[in-house]
Image (cartoon, rainbow, N blue to C red):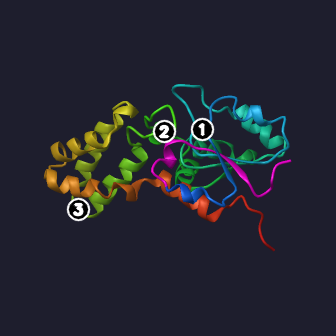
Amino acid sequence: MNDATSVTLFVGPTSWGMDATLWADTGVTLCPPARRGDIEALLPGEPGILAIADGTFHSYPAVGHAEIRTALEDGWQIWGLCSMGAIRAAEMHTLGMRGFGEVFGAYAEDPDLDDDEVALMHSSEPPYRPMSEPMFHIRRFLADLATRQLLTMDQMAAIVDELKQRWYADRTLGALKRALIQRGGLPATVVQEELANFDAFRTKQHDLLRFLKEQPWQPAVS
């Protein structure tokens, strides 16, 4: 029988670089990014708690709506956050899937938001090292530069348009650096200084950290 306070978490590149001690004493069991059939494979078991952060969509078929719906109907508590999980939770929250975090909120608010806003290229084996950067992070980084008047709104829009037209795997920090210099007119030294603080805009990681800290799957204490 599953422990009502433990959760099986499907995660990959979103957890890259995180301190392993963060997983200690959280009741979390880590699994690779969710792919089609992973949820279905768990269904013969006693209903428990699942969380989907990362999932495949290019190298393997994405985790399916039907298997999530069946699990919900069978009594599983399923959370979605960060990336593929946030997308599925926004699509299926009316069926009982629970969303968490800023990325989920963005997809819930805008059903037309492209899936590739959270996509990135990463290594196929643990620890799933990221090789590109999601547009979701890049947009927030550029908006901050515009707020601080390091970029004009037109310059920001031009850089967003250039990177959005690229294949998601080509949206790297190197490509962003070149665009900031060529389209934004920023000195290379300024760009380097700003990119050194890019972690502040990695919303997917922030959502995951909050999920582990707040542990919303835990039963409410009366």
The residue carrying pointer 1 sits among few (fewer than 14), some (14 to 19) or many (20 or more) residues within 10 Å by Cα, namely many
- Mark 1 or mark 3, earlier in chain: 1
Q: Residue at x 27, y 43 (%)?
A: 176
Q: Mark 3 points at which residue?
A: 149
Give the image location of residue 92, x and y in percent: 68, 43
* Of the pair 93 and 205, the residue shown nearer to us: 205
Residue 42, percent from left and from top: 77, 36
Q: Where is residue 64 in the image (x, y as percent from the top left)?
A: 67, 31
Q: Which of pointers 3 and 2 lies earlier in the amino acid sequence?
A: 2
Q: Mark 1 points at which residue?
A: 32
| Residue 9 shown left or right of residue 176 in the figure | right
Asked if residue 11 is among those painted magenta in the image, a careful observer would answer yes
Confirm or deny contact between disc 1 and disc 3 (CB under 8 A). no
Residue 161 magenta: no
Q: Which of 140 and 170 is in front in this view?
A: 170
Disc 2 to disc 1, how far (Cα)?
9 Å
Outermost residue, bottom side: 222
In which quadrant of the rendered view does residue 54 lie?
Answer: top right
Residues in magenta, as a range:
1-18
Q: Nearer the viewer, mark 1 or mark 3?
A: 1
At horizontal 26% and vertical 64% (from top left) the residue drawn is: 148
Mark 2 nearby-residue class (10 Å; few <14, some 14–19, many ≥20): some
Q: Which of marks 2 and 1 is nearer the N terminus?
A: 1
Task: Please name the amino acid that badge 2 sits on.
Answer: Tyr
* Tag 3: amino acid: Gln
